Image (spheres, rainbow, N blue to C red):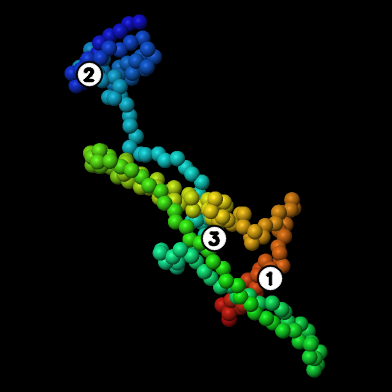
Amino acid sequence: MPIQKFKLDNGEEIKIDTSSPEFMSYENAAKQVGLVKNDEAFFFARNLEFVRQKIFMPTYAELKLLNGGLLPINTSIPEGAEEDTYDVLDSTGEADIITDFGDDIKTIEVFGNEYTNKIKSLADAYIYSVQDMRKDRMLGNVGRSVITNKALAARKAVDQKVEKMLGFGDSKYGITGMFNNSNVPIDAVAATGSVHLHYGQLKLLQIFLLTLKKRLMIWLT
């Protein structure tokens, strides 16, 4: 095993196995740029290493529930609140065809329910040292800042947790999400691609289409 001494550009000497494939690849690259083993400028590793300035980040699934507009996000609740209580007003009954002087007209009733949700807080943490601050100051590059990237990672972790809870809740705290809440109707789509709608959903669709038609008629006139 041939061992040779090499002088680095800082004056230090190191011993290298010149028969290793790694060394031979470095040596061939050095020859292509005019460097030889006896040259004082021969620094076989770092001098020939190309470091990209762009920083690559792994790609994660898009936060469609949090940022995609699929679910309405209520931002009106004060930060210090521990519970969110709201009233839901609904009605029963429907109109019907009557005869002249008929006295069997159906009545409409209204009723309300009160709902209360517990408010939970989410948090994570990141740690940095004085030495990390020194490193960031030395680099002078925000994109490679240890502290900045830790802060961004902490924010991303919170968003990912919110996204997960919007979809499936958190069974540990009795929280349900859109996909496992009993009040959210779910129907399987047939193989033909047809969609089954509940009566309530169909009525909402009809109201939406009628409203859209009226707005179009007003706009056209």
Which sits earlier in the primary sequence, circle 2 or circle 3?
Answer: 2
Please tell me in which quadrant of the rendered image residue 24 appears. Answer: top left
In the image, residue 211 sits, relative to residue 140, either above or below, namely below
What is the distance, in whole Å, between disc 2 and disc 1 at their CAs?
A: 80 Å
Which sits earlier in the primary sequence, circle 1 or circle 3?
Answer: 3
Q: Left of 183 or right of it: where is 122?
A: left
Q: Which label was assigned to residue 8?
A: 2
Q: Where is residue 109 in the image (x, y as percent from the top left)?
A: 67, 81
Q: Left of 143 or right of it: where is 210?
A: right
In the image, residue 86 sits, relative to residue 155, either above or below, namely below
Picture quarter with the C terminus: bottom right
Q: Tags 2 and 3 in contact by the CB under 8 Å rule? A: no
Q: Where is residue 120 in the image (x, y as percent from the top left)?
A: 47, 57
**Residue highlighted by disc 3:** 71
What is the distance, in whole Å, between disc 2 and disc 3 at their CAs?
A: 61 Å
Judged by depth in the image, the label closer to the viewer, 2 or 3, is: 3
Please tell me in which quadrant of the rendered image residue 51 appears. Answer: top left
Query: SS class of the residue under badge 3?
Result: loop
Query: SS class of the residue under badge 2?
Result: loop
Q: Where is residue 54 in the image (x, y as percent from the top left)?
A: 35, 39
Foreground residue, 101 or 25?
Answer: 101
What is the distance, in whole Å, between disc 1 and disc 3 at their CAs?
A: 21 Å
Can residue 145 be seen at all in this image of the molecule?
no
What kind of residue is marked 3?
A: Leu
Judged by depth in the image, the label closer to the viewer, 2 or 1, is: 1
